[in-house]
């Protein structure tokens, strides 16, 4: 299942009565945020919103399009994220095919993967309109000022397209972009992310870095830009895998980059990665403002768009917001990848109150002393899970999606001195509680039942459980008791 473009997705949401069109005139400064925040915090995440009359611009603004489990699934063409997880697991399966038949069986899978590689096309609907030179004017886009203390207006749902100057590998990251003037922006790729690595590589060449900011296209593209792929893995190939169909790319007009031909709006430009400007403050997904830091300035060289573009946006703030559902998709889709590196992991969950990086609940099949600690350290070494500030390790029977059950086992099974460990390391760039920017401490909590070798001097008591035969007896006889 794939969508040709964002307009097609909007039509589908409309047909499913999962979108509200708002014709009343609204202000892009704060008013849209307050409306969207109320909707995003309604049970299940509310409906998608299409603001058709945004004061001061001609373009409609789409928000909360991915802001429910069902809509995020619909965007990726699945009922359940597990369907994608299973497809990914089949690809990752390291089983080197032995025997000719197994080899042959694997061929279609690999051929299929090759068919997901992006295709270059000439016709680019995203270039039906092109503003260059004096026509460039970011004020004509409905870019939001989200929160009162924000340093300005921000693009919030753009894919940032860059290439590595030596390897030519593409990266697409979802990084917010601050509008500084009618034709300049500030970038915000955090130090640990691939866009920042590209910027460091460009800085070493002394050349300006070409950048394209892409809004719209199949919603799988926006999701792929947010997904924690390993450096060097092409987000556009991943989007092709997600939608089961290659993404069509077209060359930009003023920068040597390719962008999805079916995008709504593309902002092209160059940044001197050593010419830094103050970016921020910005009301962030941590529920706090992230304070100003220095980031490269983007000089816009062209703005291209469809004849009738839709401007996609989101807001972040106190959870839960739309981005929670993007994160949930990632959590489910990448479970097999986590299990490939840490096979004893049964399940994991990043609860919404933890804004992705503050809490990681993980259940394991425990087999030896200090096994929980091995898992903590493996998670702190695994991609963006390295940011997990508190890792809570639980036995396999614990449902990590039930926070009360997790709290129960922390309370019941943990001796705080014996069962916690503190480490120093890199922390999320947005963690304002850390003593230094991007550097601080993290805590592991071993909430599993302890076994010999883990510092216990008394036998661990059995957990209370009723045998099945008594349970079924009571099930059977329940009406007899006359309780309900
Ligand atoms: C709505 C939203 C906004 C985000 N904003 C930023 C941002 O401003 N800077 C950043 O470095 N990461 C941001 N992220 C997280 C990155 O998109 C995410 O970590 C992604 O995996 C980075 O891709 P990369 O590994 O190619 O760098 C944001 C994610 C979402 C969903
Ligand atoms: Mn990447």
Image: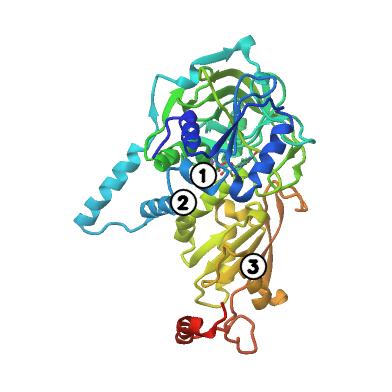
- Other residues around mark 1 within 10 Å, as few (<14) / some (14–19) / many (≥20): many
Q: Earlier in the sequence, mark 2 or mark 1?
A: 1
Q: Does any atom of ligand 1 lie closer than 8 Å to the CB of label 2? A: no
For the residue pair 110 and 247, the one nearer the viewer reads as 247
Q: Which residue is denoted by mark 2 in the rendering?
A: 81
Q: Residue at x 64, y 59 (%)?
A: 359
As displayed, is residue 417 above or below residue 131? below
Q: Earlier in the sequence, mark 1 or mark 3?
A: 1
- Other residues around mark 3 within 10 Å, as few (<14) / some (14–19) / many (≥20): few
Q: CA distance from mark 1 to mark 3?
A: 26 Å
Q: Residue at x 49, y 63 (%)?
A: 342
Q: Residue at x 71, y 74 (%)?
A: 416
Q: Earlier in the sequence, mark 2 or mark 3?
A: 2
Q: Which residue is denoted by mark 3 in the rendering?
A: 404
SS under mark 2 = helix
Q: Which residue is denoted by mark 1 in the rendering?
A: 72
Location of the C terminus by quadrant is bottom right
Q: Residue at x 24, y 52 (%)?
A: 105
SS under mark 1 = helix
As displayed, is residue 63 above or below residue 109? above
How many marks overall? 3
Position in image of residue 337 (x %, y %): 46, 55
SS under mark 3 = helix
Asked if disc 2 and disc 1 are in contact, CB closer than 8 Å, the reply is yes
For the residue pair 321 and 51, the one nearer the viewer reads as 51
Asked if disc 1 and disc 3 are in contact, CB closer than 8 Å, the reply is no
């Amino acid at each position: 299942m794939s969508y040709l473009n964002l307009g097609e997705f909007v039509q589908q949401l409309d047909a499913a009565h999962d979108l509200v069109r708002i014709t009343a005139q609204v202000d892009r400064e704060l008013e849209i945020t307050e409306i969207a925040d109320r909707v995003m915090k309604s049970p299940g995440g509310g409906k998608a919103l299409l603001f058709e009359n945004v004061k001061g611009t001609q373009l409609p603004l789409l928000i909360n399009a991915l802001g429910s489990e069902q809509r995020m699934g619909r965007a990726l063409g699945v009922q359940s994220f597990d369907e994608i997880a299973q497809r990914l697991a089949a690809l990752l399966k390291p089983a080197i095919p032995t025997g000719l038949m197994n080899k042959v069986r694997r061929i279609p899978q690999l051929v299929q993967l090759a068919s997901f590689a992006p295709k270059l096309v000439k016709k680019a609907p995203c270039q039906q309109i092109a503003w260059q030179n004096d026509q460039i004017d970011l004020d004509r886009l409905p870019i939001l000022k989200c929160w009162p203390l924000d340093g300005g207006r921000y693009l919030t749902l753009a894919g940032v397209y860059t290439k590595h100057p030596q390897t030519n590998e593409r990266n697409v990251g979802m990084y917010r972009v601050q509008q500084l003037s009618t034709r300049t922006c500030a970038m915000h790729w955090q130090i640990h992310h691939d866009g920042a690595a590209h910027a460091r590589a460009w800085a070493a060449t002394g050349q300006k870095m070409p950048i394209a900011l892409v809004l719209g296209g199949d919603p799988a593209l926006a999701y792929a830009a947010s997904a924690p792929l390993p450096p060097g893995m092409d987000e556009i190939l991943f989007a092709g895998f997600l939608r089961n169909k290659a993404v069509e790319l077209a060359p930009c007009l003023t920068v040597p980059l390719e962008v999805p031909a079916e995008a709504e709006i593309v902002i092209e430009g160059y940044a001197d990665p050593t010419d830094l400007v103050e970016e921020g403050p910005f009301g962030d997904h941590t529920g706090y403002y992230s304070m100003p830091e220095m980031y490269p300035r983007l000089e816009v060289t062209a703005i291209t768009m469809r004849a009738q573009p839709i401007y996609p946006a989101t807001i972040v703030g106190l959870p839960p917001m739309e981005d929670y559902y993007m994160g949930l998709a990632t959590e489910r889709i990448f479970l097999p990848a986590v299990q490939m590196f840490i096979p004893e992991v049964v399940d994991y969950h990043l609860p919404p109150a933890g804004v992705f990086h503050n809490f990681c609940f993980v259940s394991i099949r425990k087999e030896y002393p200090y096994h929980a600690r091995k898992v903590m350290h493996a998670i702190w070494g695994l991609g963006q899970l390295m940011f997990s500030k508190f890792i809570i390790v639980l036995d396999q029977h614990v449902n990590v999606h039930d926070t009360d059950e997790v709290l129960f086992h922390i309370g019941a099974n943990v001796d705080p001195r014996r069962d916690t460990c503190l480490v120093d390391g890199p922390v999320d760039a947005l963690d304002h509680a850390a003593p230094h920017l991007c550097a601080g401490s993290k805590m592991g909590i071993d909430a599993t039942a302890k076994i010999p070798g883990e510092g216990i001097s008394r036998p661990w008591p059995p957990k209370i459980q009723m045998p099945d035969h008594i349970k079924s007896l009571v099930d059977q006889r329940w009406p007899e008791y006359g309780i309900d």
